[in-house]
Image (tube, grey):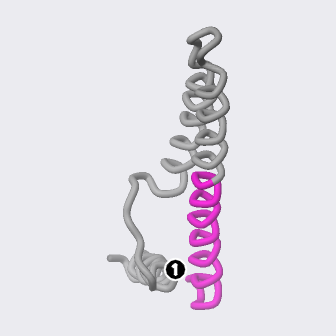
Amino acid sequence: MVDDKELEKYARQQVEAQKGFYVHLLIYLLVNVGLFFINWASKGRDGNWWFCWSALGWGIGVAAHGFSVFGAFGLFTRDWEERQVKRIVDKERGRQNGH
């Protein structure tokens, strides 16, 4: 049987993984918006939207990261991190108690 400290440690690791995904997503969005504007500024010369390849390739990686962390996407609010820790701890307690 896993004690409460181990459960909370596990839950906090899960929350850190989720936060890592959100940082990854933010960087993806910022970089690709920048690439879009660079591509847009130079589009008059050749009409080639090359930034799409970066967005597509990296987007697949972001999606895989999200599915590995969440399984499915959800929204979070102000108290999201603490709720996530509590949810994971409660889930693990339920497993230990045979529920």
Report the residue at 56% width, 11% height from top: 47
In the image, farthest residue toward the left: 99
Report the residue at 54% width, 41% height from top: 64
Up/down of 79 relative to 98, above or below? below
Q: Does the magenta stretch include residue 14?
A: yes
**Are there few (<14), some (14-19), or many (20+) residues within 10 Å of tag 1?**
some
Quarter of the image that includes the C terminus: bottom left
Q: Which of 48 and 58 is in front in this view?
A: 48
Up/down of 31 relative to 20, above or below? above
Q: How many marks?
A: 1
Report the residue at 57% width, 72% height from top: 15
Residue 83 quadrant: bottom left
Q: Nearer the viewer, residue 55 or 91?
A: 55
Identify the secondary structure beneath mark 1. Answer: helix
Up/down of 49 relative to 20, above or below? above
Q: Nearer the viewer, residue 12 or 62?
A: 62
In the image, farthest residue toward the top: 46
Report the residue at 64% width, 61% height from top: 20
Q: Does the magenta stretch include residue 33?
A: no
Quarter of the image that includes the N terminus: bottom right
Residue bounds of the magenta highlight? 1-26
Q: Nearer the viewer, residue 79 or 70?
A: 79
Q: Which amino acid type corresponds to the residue marked 1 in the rendered image?
A: Glu
List the residue tagged with mark 1.
81
Q: Is the magenta stretch mostly helix, strand or loop?
A: helix
